Image (spheres, rainbow, N blue to C red):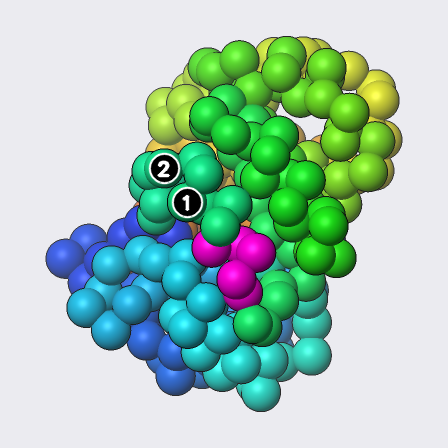
């Protein structure tokens, strides 16, 4: 499975191709799905451009994307969007339109409570386990671990020469407990080398302007659609 991560924390200052508004996100999602993406991950943006987990912003984003695609759509719950753990839980409990899944970064404070709030609302959880953090160890002790939708094994090493080995170390930390539920991905310079590891191991992966701005041949990506098409070609 290839997931498309539409925008992440990037803005137009990094690439004019990054979609921000609900309409732009919907168009980008539709093109990416047509290119082969089977799942969507998005960071909802307020009209000012900042990331937001507020019920209104999440509802507008999800409604627009779901009008354009018929695949699962998930959102971030990253601490950068709302630093206060209690406030993040409060916002999740106030969502009026629910995503199919939401990512929870296990190294961030309040991860257990946030996961519980999502599961109580019927939202599946993607467990974000970042290399270089204690996320994998904390998740291994979590009572929620058996019930997550998948593990997002996120390799933060951006050096293309060392990212594959960082990916293997992170997978070793996870062990064999999660089987086919692992989505392995990298970022920036490590994105395509880590995607190649995922393909070789038969794991899910993802691509999109959140993770990488360049195609495997070094050309700057013009869209999420281009990135997904390149990931599909890599998987073949």
Visible residue check, residue 37 = no
Q: Based on the picture, tell me whether residue 67 belongs to the magenta stretch.
A: no
Residue found 52% across the figure and 62% down from its top: 94
Q: Quadrant of the N terminus?
A: bottom right
Q: Residue 151: percent from the left, percent from the top?
A: 68, 35
Q: Residues within 10 Å of mark 2 (few under 14, many from 20)?
A: few
Q: For the residues marked 2 and 1, what is the alpha-carbon distance in whole angstroms?
A: 5 Å
The part of the image, by quadrant, that contains residue 139 is top right
Callouts 2 and 1 close, C-beta under 8 Å: yes
Q: Residue 148: percent from the left, percent from the top?
A: 76, 40
Visible residue check, residue 179 = yes
Counting the numbered discs, the total is 2
Q: Residues within 10 Å of mark 1 (few under 14, many from 20)?
A: few
- 39 relative to 158, above or below: below
Q: Is residue 174 left or right of residue 49?
A: right
Q: Residue 144: percent from the left, percent from the top?
A: 75, 31
Q: Please tell me whether the stretch drawn in magenta is mainly helix, strand or loop.
A: helix
Part of the protein shown in magenta: 91-95
Residue 87: give its label: 1
> Which is more toward the observer, 137 or 91?
91
Element at label 1: helix
The part of the image, by quadrant, that contains residue 125 is top right
Q: Is residue 8 left or right of residue 64?
A: left
Q: Is residue 90 left or right of residue 137?
A: left
> Which is more toward the observer, 155 or 77?
77
- 23 relative to 49, above or below: below
Query: Which residue is label 2 attached to?
Result: 84
Residue 176: give its label: none
- 164 relative to 115, above or below: above
Residue found 75% across the figure and 57% down from its top: 122
Residue found 35% across the figure and 45% down from its top: 82
> Which is more toward the observer, 45 or 9?
45
């Amino acid at each position: 499975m290839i997931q498309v991560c539409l925008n992440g924390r990037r803005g137009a200052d990094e690439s004019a191709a990054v979609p921000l508004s609900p309409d732009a996100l919907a168009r980008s999602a539709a093109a990416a799905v047509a290119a082969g993406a089977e799942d969507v991950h998005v960071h909802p943006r307020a009209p000012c451009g900042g990331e937001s987990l507020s019920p209104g912003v999440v509802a507008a984003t999800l409604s627009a994307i779901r009008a354009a695609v018929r695949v699962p759509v998930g959102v971030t719950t990253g601490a950068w969007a709302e630093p206060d753990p209690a406030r993040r839980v409060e916002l999740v409990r106030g969502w009026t339109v629910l995503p199919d899944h939401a990512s929870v970064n296990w190294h961030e404070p309040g991860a257990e409570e946030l996961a519980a709030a999502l599961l109580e609302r019927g939202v599946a959880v993607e467990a974000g386990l970042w290399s270089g953090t204690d996320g994998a160890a904390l998740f291994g002790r979590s009572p929620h671990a058996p019930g997550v939708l998948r593990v997002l094994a996120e390799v933060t090493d951006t050096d293309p020469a060392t990212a594959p080995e960082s990916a293997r170390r992170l997978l070793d930390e996870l062990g064999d407990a999660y089987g086919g539920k692992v989505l392995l991905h990298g970022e920036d310079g490590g994105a395509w080398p880590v995607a190649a590891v995922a393909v070789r191991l038969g794991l899910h992966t993802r691509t999109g302007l959140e993770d990488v701005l360049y195609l495997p041949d070094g050309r700057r990506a013009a869209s999420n659609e281009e990135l997904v098409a390149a990931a599909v070609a890599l998987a073949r």
